[in-house]
Amino acid sequence: MSTLLNTNIYDYTRVLDKAADAAWIRNDCINNNLANVNTPGYKREDVDFKAQLKQAMREFRYMTTDQKVASLKDEDLKPKSYIDYAGYSYRKDENNVDIDVENVYLAENQMYYYGLTTSITTNFSDLKTVTK
């Protein structure tokens, strides 16, 4: 059992957990966008954890993926939201939320979150099987 604790298997689970947290926060952002679809001047908010993780991994050059994942700090994995000022608005009120696009993002994010939670559950199930 002590050998299992010295492996990096928990590092991957931690990254999956942080990705699920980011997906949850993104879900809140998308719902907030939908709630403000008719608010003049409102700019959509989003979370791009995938790009953030990719950037953090890029900082650890010349390492294996296992070493990169093990080197990630919690602040590298903290989901950050941003305001989408680049999203062009064709509306006079300068709101850049498109209800149809937001609903697609919401469905995509919900499937992504489900996949992450399934992966986390599978990881723990595998660990349980190995430790028996």
Image: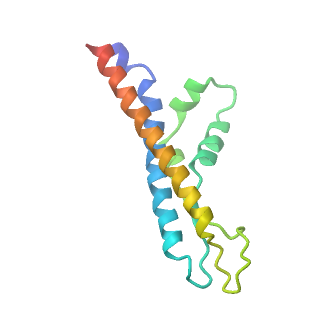
**Residue 15 x %, y %:** 48, 37
Relative height, residue 71 to residue 66 (above, below): below
- The quadrant in which residue 129 appears is top left
- The quadrant in which residue 3 appears is top left
Q: Nearer the viewer, residue 123 or 114?
A: 114
Q: How many marks?
A: 0
Q: Nearer the viewer, residue 68 or 79?
A: 79
Color encoding of the figure:
rainbow
Q: Nearer the viewer, residue 95 or 56?
A: 95
Relative height, residue 123 to residue 113 (above, below): above
**Residue 18 x %, y %:** 46, 44
- Which quarter of the rendering shows the N terminus? top left
**Residue 59 x %, y %:** 66, 38
In the image, is 55 to the left or to the right of 19? right
Q: Is residue 89 visible?
A: yes
Q: Is residue 82 visible?
A: no
Tell me what residue is drawn at x 62 percent, y 62 percent: 101
Q: Residue furthest front?
A: 100
Relative height, residue 37 to residue 15 (above, below): below
Tell me what residue is drawn at x 53 percent, y 70 percent: 33
- Which quarter of the rendering shows the C terminus? top left
Tell me what residue is drawn at x 29 percent, y 21 percent: 128
- The quadrant in which residue 50 appears is top right
